Image (tube, grey):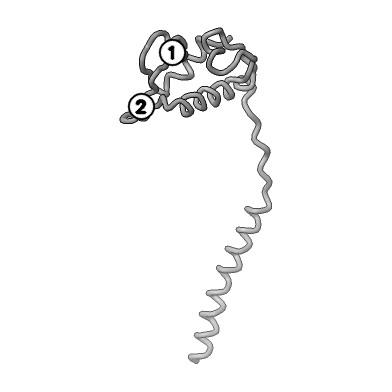
Amino acid sequence: MAKKVKKAAKKAAKKPAKKAAKKVVKKAAKKKSARKPNAAFMVALTPNAALGAVIGSKPVPRTEIIKKLWAYIKKNGLQDSKNRRMINADEKLKVVFAGKNQVSMFDLAKLIGKNAK
């Protein structure tokens, strides 16, 4: 009798493992669609003279403007050392930041909207 109980226990243990393996295969079989960028972000914007002095005057998408602006900030060490969310302005950025000495990183999108058309 003990052998029958052991065999039944082994069979019961094997069945859920097989079902779990099948579920994993089904999930892996699904294909993810390629992620498409939002068209509004990819429209080329022409920076004005103030922003053009920092990132260049060629029309570029909003996402590239942000990348170039952050590259300029990192290259010149303009991120505040104590409060990393704040960006200190140098001579070029002060014009872009509407005369402010310091702005929050969350205000960059708003400032780009004012300086690029």
Label whose residue precedes the other's in the sequence (2 or 1): 2
Indicate whether 100 appears above or below 76.
above
Q: CA distance from mark 2 to mark 1?
A: 16 Å
- Total tally of numbered discs in the picture: 2
Tell me: 37 left or right of 13. right
Query: Where residue 70 sits in the image (x, y, percent)?
Result: 49, 26
Mark sitting on residue 82:
none
Residue nearest the observer in this picture, 117 or 18: 117
Under mark 1, the amino acid is Glu
Query: Where residue 93 sits in the image (x, y, percent)?
Result: 45, 15
Query: Where residue 33 sits in the image (x, y, percent)?
Result: 68, 39
The crowd level at tag 1 (other Cα within 10 Å; few <14, some 14-19, many 20+) is: few
Indicate whether 19 appears above or below 82.
below
Q: Residue at x 58, y 20 (%)?
A: 62
Q: Nearer the viewer, mark 2 or mark 1?
A: 1
Under mark 2, the amino acid is Asp
Mark 1, secondary structure of its residue: helix
Indicate whether 79 appears above or below 1.
above
Tell me: 86 left or right of 70. left
Q: Residue at x 56, y 8 (%)?
A: 48
| Residue bearing mark 1 | 91
State the quadrant of the C terminus.
Answer: top right
Query: Where residue 56 sits in the image (x, y, percent)?
Result: 59, 16
Mark 2, secondary structure of its residue: loop
Name the outermost residue toward the left.
Answer: 82
Q: Residue at x 53, y 16 (%)?
A: 54
| Residue bearing mark 2 | 80
Indicate whether 1 appears above or below 103.
below
Tell me: 1 left or right of 45. left
Residue nearest the observer in this picture, 52 or 27: 52
Mark 2 vs 1: CB contact within 8 A: no
The crowd level at tag 2 (other Cα within 10 Å; few <14, some 14-19, many 20+) is: some
